[in-house]
Image (cartoon, helix red, strand yellow):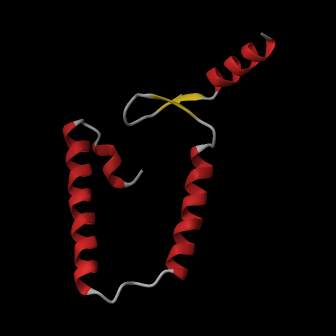
Amino acid sequence: MKKLIILSFFYLISCSTVPMTGRKQLVAIPSSQIIALSGESYAQVLQEAQISSNAQYRTSVQKVGEKLTRAVEAYLVKNDLEEYLDGA
């Protein structure tokens, strides 16, 4: 019973609200740490990965990225969340 109370306490204090959606989430790793780790991982991928020599593949990836960008921007505008468009 004591363990259940302790686990419940930690669950409650580790929940936070997602600013963009207002949903609750369990936070096991702080956002600042996730952002730092993702930056490191991205830098590593850029160093180790090779850009495809296939122009068709590169164009396809570029188009998907552009469509994704437009969809996210439209979602943010529709939901009055334009402040997230500047990368803040």
Q: Residue at x 55, y 60 (%)?
A: 38
Please determine whether, in this image, residue 54 is positioned above or below residue 7.
below
> Could you say which is closer to the camera, residue 48 or residue 14?
48
Q: Residue at x 63, y 38 (%)?
A: 28
> Could you say which is closer to the camera, residue 16 or residue 59?
59
Residue 87 is situated, as x and y percent measured from the top left of the image, at: 39, 54
Q: Residue at x 24, y 65 (%)?
A: 64
**Based on the displayed image, in which of its 4 quarters is residue 23 positioned?**
top left
Please determine whether, in this image, residue 83 is positioned above or below residue 26.
below
Q: Residue at x 59, y 66 (%)?
A: 40
Residue 39 is situated, as x and y percent measured from the top left of the image, at: 55, 64
In the displayed structure image, the side of residue 88 where residue 72 appears, left or right: left
In the displayed structure image, the side of residue 7 where residue 18 appears, left or right: left
Question: Which quadrant would the N terminus be assigned to in this image?
Answer: top right
In the displayed structure image, the side of residue 56 where residue 4 appears, left or right: right
**Based on the displayed image, in which of its 4 quarters is residue 14 positioned?**
top right
Residue 88 is situated, as x and y percent measured from the top left of the image, at: 42, 50
> Could you say which is closer to the camera, residue 73 or residue 1?
1
Residue 35 is situated, as x and y percent measured from the top left of the image, at: 55, 54
